[in-house]
Amino acid sequence: IQDGTCDTRVVVLFVQGMSTTLSNMILYQILLIQDQQHDHHQHVFNDWGAMLFSKQMRLLQDFMGGLLLLLSSSESGGATTTVLDQWANLNQAVTVLQLEKPSDWISYYQHSSTSTGGSTTLDMQDIAAIMSLRVEFGKEAIASVCRRHQDKNTTS
């Protein structure tokens, strides 16, 4: 890339494709782990594990974005934003894993809905499944958040 022998379009398409594939694959694995753990009532993340996972995901994103940064800005044509958008679902899953308590989801949801003008990228079923992977999060606390979220969306 640095010596200019790579076709810019190929690099951009490669990075976009790899970002989509990696982020979807990792999110799928997180949700698959939850399904497998459901029967055994085991958790896979504690607070420190969630922070480490977050760091690992940022490193992957930085690597993919770094490939695009090797291209000139006129060559990449805004592809960096597109690549970052492809990580939105996984970034949201990481945020859920890093919550201090399940009820913090309501504040995060309200803030993200207000600041982006939209809503979150994952549905509440996936959010609850991801929350259930945290050692510190109890079933009742997660269920309460889901009910509160549903109530707020029903009255809105």
Image (cartoon, grey):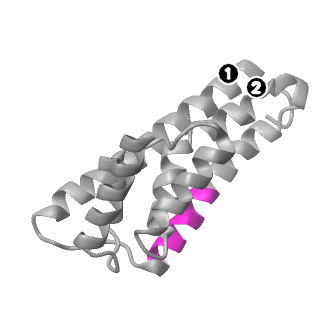
**Is residue 141 at all visible to an observer of this figure?**
yes
The percent position of residue 152, horizontal first and vertical second, equals: 41, 49
Label placed on residue 6: 2
Residue neighbourhood size for the residue with mark 2, other residues' Cα within 10 Å, grouped as few (<14), some (14–19), many (≥20): few
Rendered position, 130 above or below 21? below
The percent position of residue 3, horizontal first and vertical second, equals: 86, 34
Marks 1,2: beta carbons within 8 A: yes
Q: Quick check: 107 left or right of 72?
A: left
Rendered position, 103 above or below 65? below
Numbered disc 2: secondary structure: loop
The percent position of residue 61, horizontal first and vertical second, equals: 63, 50
Q: Amino acid at mark 1?
A: Val
- The residue depicted at 34 percent of the width and 48 percent of the height is 150
Q: Quick check: 82 left or right of 122?
A: right
The percent position of residue 21, horizontal first and vertical second, equals: 47, 36
Q: Amino acid at mark 2?
A: Cys
Label placed on residue 10: 1
Magenta stretch secondary structure, dominant? helix
Q: Which residues are magenta?
A: 49-58
Q: CA distance from mark 1 to mark 2?
A: 7 Å
Label placed on residue 57: none
